[in-house]
């Protein structure tokens, strides 16, 4: 095997930079990351620092700012949740201000939490107001959905992406098809369930049916959640293959520039050799990726 394969830049669409040292991602094979929840002032500084260190191999950073949650809602009170990372939204009238606060930090996406298994969630009217305010501000909305009915709640409100593939419920086929039809994206995060067989089976099944329905899958690991490898995650790619994604679909999930911003000029992914014929060997090949520049 000789030569190299060049692909668009690889992106992890779900990380938490306050829970993992951003500097450790230099040389990781990731050209970009999307931070999906933290103290917006802190994460904004990380994003600026990454931009300044781009020539030293730091991935560029897009970010969501704070978790927008119902009063007392997830992840309020969680030991891992950084100070200032939750912004409670009390009413539809409060939604516009909450979104404006995040936009003032330069976010590329707004994050809401809908975890019915861990406390109150935004009511339908308040959630819709958050979505409307974000869209008026020119950014999409991503939701953490957990618990019965939360996937449906997010879809009805017009949420643009799910931060995790649903794993606490088997999503109805009709709902899966509707999500795919309206262009909702699902971020994979399958490997975080490696120690929960039922959860992983449910997530893989839901994602496979979403992909089969034409839904757009985004590669994401929830980096910072437990002991996950830095850089391209072999187990996450293997789980994508298990869900039925072929080589082209896996690469598309890794290289989607969502949330709608362009990659910095010249960035690309370089992998020695050519893609393997055996799909089972694809994860091992992709984890050898390096960030480069094609001239």
Image (tube, rainbow, N blue to C red):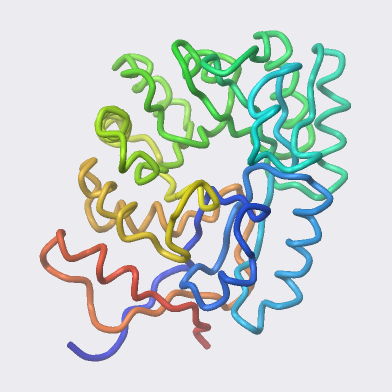
Locate residue 69 relative to residue 222 in the image: left or right.
right
Locate residue 223 relative to residue 70 in the image: left or right.
left
Compared with residue 70, is residue 78 higher up or lower down, i.e. above or below? below
Q: Residue at x 45, y 59 (%)?
A: 255
Q: The N terminus lies in which quarter of the figure? A: bottom left
Q: Quadrant of residue 234?
A: bottom left
Q: Residue at x 30, y 54 (%)?
A: 235
Q: Position of residue 250 (x, y in %)?
A: 32, 54
Locate residue 97 relative to residue 277 in the image: left or right.
right
Compared with residue 119, is residue 228 higher up or lower down, i.e. above or below? below
Q: Quadrant of residue 111?
A: top right
Q: Residue at x 81, y 60 (%)?
A: 45
Compared with residue 22, is residue 35 higher up or lower down, i.e. above or below? above
Q: Position of residue 267 (x, y in %)?
A: 55, 75
Q: Position of residue 52 (x, y in %)?
A: 76, 76
Q: Position of residue 42 (x, y in %)?
A: 80, 54
């Amino acid at each position: 095997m000789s030569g190299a394969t060049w692909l668009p830049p690889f992106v992890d669409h779900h990380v938490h930079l306050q829970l993992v040292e951003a500097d450790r991602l230099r040389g990781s094979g990731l050209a970009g990351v999307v931070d999906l929840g933290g103290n917006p002032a802190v994460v904004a500084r990380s994003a600026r620092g990454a931009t300044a260190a781009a020539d030293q191999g730091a991935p560029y950073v897009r970010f969501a700012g704070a978790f927008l949650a119902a009063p007392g809602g997830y992840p309020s009170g969680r030991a891992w949740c950084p100070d200032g990372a939750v912004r409670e939204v009390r009413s539809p009238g409060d939604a516009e201000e909450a979104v404006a606060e995040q936009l003032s930090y330069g976010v590329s996406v707004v994050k809401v939490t809908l975890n019915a298994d861990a406390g109150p969630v935004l009511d339908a009217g308040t959630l819709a107001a958050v979505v409307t305010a974000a869209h008026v501000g020119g950014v999409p909305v991503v939701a953490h959905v957990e618990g019965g009915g939360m996937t449906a709640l997010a879809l009805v409100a017009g949420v643009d992406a799910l931060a995790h593939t649903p794993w606490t419920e088997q999503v109805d086929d009709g709902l899966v098809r509707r999500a795919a039809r309206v262009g909702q994206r699902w971020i994979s995060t399958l490997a975080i369930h490696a120690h929960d067989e039922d959860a992983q089976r449910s997530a893989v099944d839901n994602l496979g049916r979403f992909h089969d329905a034409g839904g757009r899958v985004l590669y994401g690991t929830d980096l910072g959640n437990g002991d996950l490898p830095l850089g391209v995650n072999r187990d996450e790619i293997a789980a994508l293959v298990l869900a039925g994604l072929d080589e082209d679909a896996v690469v598309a999930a890794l290289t989607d520039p969502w949330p709608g911003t362009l990659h910095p000029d010249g960035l690309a992914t370089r992998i020695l050799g050519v893609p393997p014929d055996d799909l089972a060997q694809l994860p091992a090949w992709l984890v050898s990726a390096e960030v480069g520049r094609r001239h």
